[in-house]
Amino acid sequence: MRWKNKRRSQRIDDRRGRGIAKGGAKLSSGVIVIALIVAFITGQNPLTLLGGLMQQGGGQSQQVEIPKQQSPEQQQQADFSSVILASTEDVWTAIFKQQGQQYPAPTMVLFDGRVQSACGVNSEAVGPFYCPADQKVYLSLGFFRQLERLGAPGDFARAYVIGHEVGHHIQNITGTERQVRQWQQQASSKSQVNQLSVLMELQADCYAGVWAHHANKLQNMLEPGDVEEGLQAAASIGDDSLQKRAGQQVNAEAFTHGSSQQRVKWLKTGLNSGRYEACNTFEQGA
């Protein structure tokens, strides 16, 4: 992809190098000074006093920042992700403007290990995700290595993942996400709940394709072979492919994201049409 020297997003929250750890309540410098004075007068151990104050504070969970050096490769991946997010901002702003609406762009949180979101605490093991409650995309750059292990290397494979999560943001701000959750609550079986989830995920794939169509048209971002990388990524993370890799029998009723064939189909639909309206998986079916 031609991404270098392009605009980077200002909506990046880089939390890499931080961990969520148990810690007591924070003590102000004034409280610490007073504790030291009391310890000096009474002859008590200052650490004992400070420990008691921390316990009184409640011992709530808090972010503990751990300085961490980023490798050149990690920094390049962060820069790449910022450029792709900026491109989604430009494309979706233009699409919404055509409809007489403003596009409220999401923030993207870069993290490693675990991360706190408005949807709870998640590990990087869950992969990239979108939280509707805070309208943020959460991305662990380590997922890019996992894509390579699944046979989906390349810049556009990574960009597709970001475009897909931004697709969930589109669903959220247009009311689709809320409507689908309501349907899922009314569903009579687990397989119906899963099928609705599949339609949501396939629509997000299509939205990723719509973004890529316009990103190439407006910003000349795609190079020969990029589209194939994206399609390979979509195929690699189809539910049937993942079940086979795990040594399981393919069980379509357990699908939550769609088969490889379905994911490729809907990504191509967005790529070829460039039309937001073409992505209505709920009317057209998987």
Image (tube, rainbow, N blue to C red):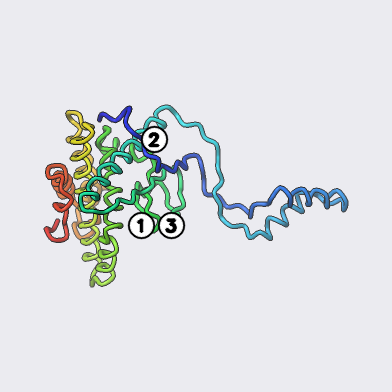
CA separation in Å, label 1 and label 2? 23 Å
Q: Quadrant of the C terminus?
A: bottom left
Question: In this figure, which residue is indicated by the disc labeled 3?
Answer: 118
Task: Identify the amino acid type marked 3.
Answer: Ala
What residue lies at 24% left-to-right and 61% top-to-bottom?
Answer: 194
- Percent position of residue 55, x then y: 68, 58
**Which one is earlier in the sequence, the residue at label 3 or at label 1?**
3
Question: In this figure, which residue is indicated by the disc labeled 2?
Answer: 78
What residue lies at 36% left-to-right and 35% top-to-bottom?
Answer: 8
* Horizontal side, residue 30 vs residue 80: left or right: right
Question: Label 2: few (<14), some or many (≥20) within 10 Å?
Answer: some
Q: Answer whether labels 3 and 1 touch (C-beta < 8 Å).
A: no
What residue lies at 88% left-to-right and 51% top-to-bottom?
Answer: 41
* Horizontal side, residue 264 vs residue 134: left or right: left
- Percent position of residue 254, x then y: 23, 59
**Is residue 86 shown above or below 135?**
above
CA separation in Å, label 3 and label 2? 23 Å
**Is residue 247 shown above or below 231?**
below
In front of the other: 111 or 210:
210
**Which one is earlier in the sequence, the residue at label 1 or at label 2?**
2
In front of the other: 14 or 265:
14
Task: Provide the secondary structure element on which disc 1 rests.
Answer: loop
Task: Provide the secondary structure element on which disc 3 rests.
Answer: loop
Question: In this figure, which residue is indicated by the disc labeled 1?
Answer: 132
CA separation in Å, label 3 and label 1? 8 Å
- Is residue 249 visible in this depiction of the protein? no
- Percent position of residue 12, x then y: 41, 42
**Is residue 119 shown above or below 65?**
below
Task: Provide the secondary structure element on which disc 2 rests.
Answer: helix
Q: Answer whether labels 3 and 2 touch (C-beta < 8 Å).
A: no
